[in-house]
Image: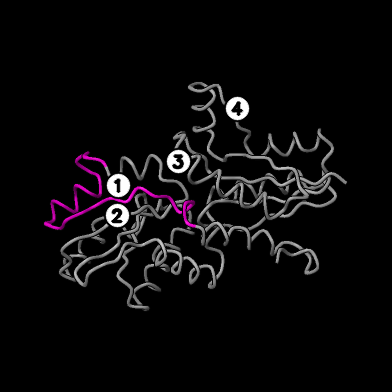
Amino acid sequence: MKKALLVISFGTSYPQAMQRNIKVCEQELADAFPERDFFRAFTSSMIIKKLSQRDRIEISNPRQALERLKRAGYRDVLIQSLHIINGDEYEKIVREVEHCRDWFERIEIGVPLLSSFDDYNRLIEAIEYQSPELEADERLVLMGHGATHHAFSAYACLDHMIRENELPFVVGAVESYPGIDSVINRLRQENVRKVYLMPLMLVAGDHAINDMASDEPDSWKVLIRQAGIEAEPIVQGLGENQLIRQLFVDHLAATQPAEEQVA
């Protein structure tokens, strides 16, 4: 029976971010499941369109990828989401899989990065691994994407767990809570002198480059500096972190019967 591995991310239009964050995750998953043929899909129609028009690179969305696997005769499909939270983008994948389930003898989905209490603890360990050394009056500020979906609460939960563990990290989100105003208020309350800024996103793409690290008047770097606090961006996505990549591998392995799980 033909077996496929389909890795689905939001996507990126930045070639360097694609190489450093998405492709490395895909390769690690492909190496962990060598008996399967690898395929890629993005959930962002905007990025798919941009790559097609700008670079003539054609990327499937989840439905297109599943249709192609069906036509090619694959009957056993494993899917791994590279999304951070169980939000709108992940639900797109779930809906398409349910629509196409009858096409395959077996189809399974590995859950996003933050899907269990253990995942939060492992993410905190991964942040410690990736963080620069911090002085007592320094913090690492992590910029998450945020969401209108109720899963936006994952960012506040992560921040709460970090504070409970008395770690020098602060979590914020571009498009939901905790916003940059909340982040700056906390930094002032804690008399922070300097922060390092790092994306809490798989890819260091548009948000990291523009909303976090640019000289635009509303970038986090500029707003924090205007508050009298030094700010130094670290433009690295979570995909560059080997502990994050392993967490995705473990999520996919968890979909397998015990006798087939990756060691």
Q: Which mark is residue 197?
A: 2
Closer to the observer: label 1 or label 3?
3
User: Can you identify the residue that label 1 sits on?
Assistant: 212
Residue contact between numbered discs 2 and 1, judged by CB atoms under 8 Å? yes
User: Can you identify the residue that label 4 sits on?
Assistant: 58
| Mark 4 element type | loop
Q: Is residue 35 above or below residue 138?
A: above
Q: Position of residue 33 (x, y in %)?
A: 72, 53
User: Which amino acid is tagged 1?
Assistant: Met
Q: Position of residue 89 (x, y in %)?
A: 55, 47
* Residue interval drawn in magenta: 214-241
User: Which amino acid is tagged 4?
Assistant: Glu
Q: Residues within 10 Å of mark 2 (few under 14, many from 20)?
A: many
| Mark 3 element type | helix
Q: Residue shown at 37%/68% (left/top)?
A: 159
Of label 1 and label 4, which has the lower sequence position?
4
Q: CA distance from mark 2 to mark 1?
A: 7 Å
Q: Residue shown at 70%/42% (left/top)?
A: 38
Q: Which mark is residue 17?
A: 3
Identify which residue, 100 or 38, lies in the foreground.
38
Closer to the observer: label 2 or label 1?
2
Q: Residues within 10 Å of mark 3 (few under 14, many from 20)?
A: many
Colouring: one colour
